[in-house]
Image (cartoon, rainbow, N blue to C red):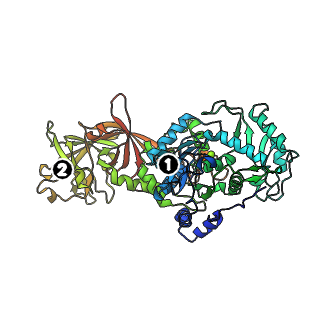
Amino acid sequence: MSKHPAGRPSGVPAAQAAQAGTPLPASNFIRHIIDEDLARGTNAARTWGGAPGPATAHAGQPVDPAKIRTRFPPEPNGYLHFGHAKSICLNFGLARDYGGACHMRFDDTNPEKEGQEYVDAILDAVKWLGFGWDAFGTEHLYFASDYFDFMYQAAEHLIEAGHAYVDSLSAQQMRTLRGTLTEPGKPSPYRERGVAENLGLFRGMRAGRFAEGEHVLRAKIDMASPNINLRDPAIYRIRKAAHHRTGDAWCIYPMYTYAHPIEDALENITHSICTLEFEDQRPFYDWLLERLSESTTLPDGRILDGLLLRPVPRQYEFARLNLTYVVLSKRKLIELVEEGLVEGWDDPRMPTLVGARRRGYTPEGFRLFAERIGVAKSDSWIDYATLEECMREDLNERALRRIAVLDPLKLVIDNYPEALEEECQAPNHPQKPDWGRRSVPFSKELWIEREDFMEAPVKGYFRLFPPGVNAAGEATPGSRVRLRYGFVIECTGFDKDPAGRIVAVHCNYFPDSKSGTPGSDSYKVKGNIHWVSARHACTAEVRLYDRLFKMPHPGAGDRDLMLDLNPDSVKTVIGQLEPALRTAKPGEHYQFERHGYFVADRIDPVTGEPDFNRAVTLKDTWQK
Ligand code: ATP
Ligand code: MG
């Protein structure tokens, strides 16, 4: 029987606190709850034994130096996606801002599909985003599987206190008795088993005496509860599977809904923040932690002490990130990888953090994005363009400017001496003079963009076009443009191959027009194009990425997700780049002038020179 009433004397019940947050901006509701908890001292008296543990480990220890404790608890069964980034920024960000600690916890209670590969990748991703789990002199890196012994002990405790029983119905029978949203459930015939029989069976489950599915341990709550999650949920099941960390030590594993609150409580978590789908689980979360923290007088007069420290953690729900044009679900992302529709988890089109990194997205861009979208209490869709805009803003600040010709066409300067080479000076960042300038070599043959020349110019076209004849039958000169950071040229003609494709453009240059030299600005031209010296160019593969899905809500309705894939999500070109890019290191960001933001990706083993990926264009090209 319960001795202590549920709830905390100085605490703020979840629902009430959430309501109090409603009038504030949505992005503040969790901070508002924390502010109130701090003001009321809800968690001020908690003690901390230096490591996760039950009440006995924390009792009598110093007051917890962490004002709040949050956690990021991924299951190591896949790579992290953009949705996880939101959760990481939120949980680690709150701990940072409030003088708290955020625990990095692997929720590895399900033996299937989990593995070390994912553990390593997840740790890397969190660090890459700029967060760490060191706080108050301790590394807060935890594995839920380390708590299996305690979880087992807690289950026996529940049995002894009369709050759990072994059920021997089949899964199908259990489903039938569970009832529906409109009909209450019915008790299992095994619900009234005595404590001794339950303990015997549960120990037998642990000892491996039964087959999978033969028995499950269930919490004994209320088969008539309007919340189906309280109709005696299963808390332990038999699973004869090896676990990536505990090996064959266990053949029973706790259910997620049972394990998670216990993990939080052992770690002294104050604010357990999860996505909205867990809202209906909150009553069970609270029920379980109350049962495990209260002391109970048994019918024979013995007193069972509570196992967990009070005040217990509280769960708060926020809206998951839904982002248009991608899917944020490990299960669906695995499908893309396994069906070979992308090159792997780190394909730059994937909405994973390893993919984003290769795509040239930045941690700062993600943090800006998390800040900008805020934290809401109801689900909505965020436009992919919002994420791109954050990346663009960040990359604009950090990317060196470079020149790249991505659809190369030869430009021959007929009056430029064959053997001559000279240097032009180009700024590394137009708004940051302190970043300096670099030399770009200039010579007789250059690469320019094919679209910067038109044989028959349309009205308003100010780039290169050849001499011609106007409507009145008069001869007109070829256009004059400035080769950015170089000379003014005048187009004189062009060459075609036998198939009629333009293969070279000819021009003359004005030797006294070099940018930055006295008098050079007396040349007035309307066009300004970029170029790369052909003799010096770095030839590189450049991948131009677009959205992975062509529909804003991929797979919406009953559509097959795979049918919504964008068939043109990557275009590979061979670009001619300014020679400084030859030594770009993987991960370095550049703005290719007039093209967008790029990142050096992998080094070609043959040439020793990098490939480049486009992170984002200079402007949003989708909002039309
Ligand atoms: P998925 O459904 O993609 O497998 P998950 O929720 O099962 O995701 P976990 O590894 O269990 O993945 O999640 C770790 C943490 O990340 C959880 O606290 C979860 O709430 C959070 N999270 C997962 N997806 C999102 C999302 N789209 N937006 C915000 N947070 C998310
Ligand atoms: Mg999951």
Above or below — where is 68 with respect to 572?
below
- Using the image, tell me which numbered label, if any, was put on residue 557: none
The mark tally for this picture is 2
Q: Residues within 10 Å of mark 2 (few under 14, many from 20)?
A: many
592 left or right of 224 in image: left
Residue bearing the label numbered 2: 487
Residue bearing the label numbered 1: 547
Q: Residues within 10 Å of mark 1 (few under 14, many from 20)?
A: many
10 left or right of 88 in image: right
Residue 542 or residue 573, whichever sits in front? 542
> Residue at 35% across / 50% down in the picture?
595
Quick one: SS at disc 2? loop
Quick one: SS at disc 1? loop
207 left or right of 438 in image: right
354 left or right of 563 in image: left
Residue 348, position as x, y percentages in the image:
47, 42
Could you tell me how far apart the alpha carbons at marks 2 and 1 are, in whole angstroms?
A: 38 Å
Q: Amino acid at mark 1?
A: Arg
| Quarter containing the N terminus | bottom right
Tell me if the residue at label 2 has its CB under 8 Å from ligand 1.
no
Residue 309 or residue 552, whichever sits in front? 309
Residue 42, position as x, y percentages in the image:
58, 62
Residue 494, position as x, y percentages in the image:
26, 44
Q: Amino acid at mark 2?
A: Phe
Residue 569, position as x, y percentages in the image:
49, 45
Q: Is residue 5 visible to the viewer in this orientation of the structure?
A: yes
* Tag 2 near tag 1, CB within 8 Å: no
Q: Nearer the viewer, mark 2 or mark 1?
A: 1
Above or below — where is 255 with respect to 97?
above
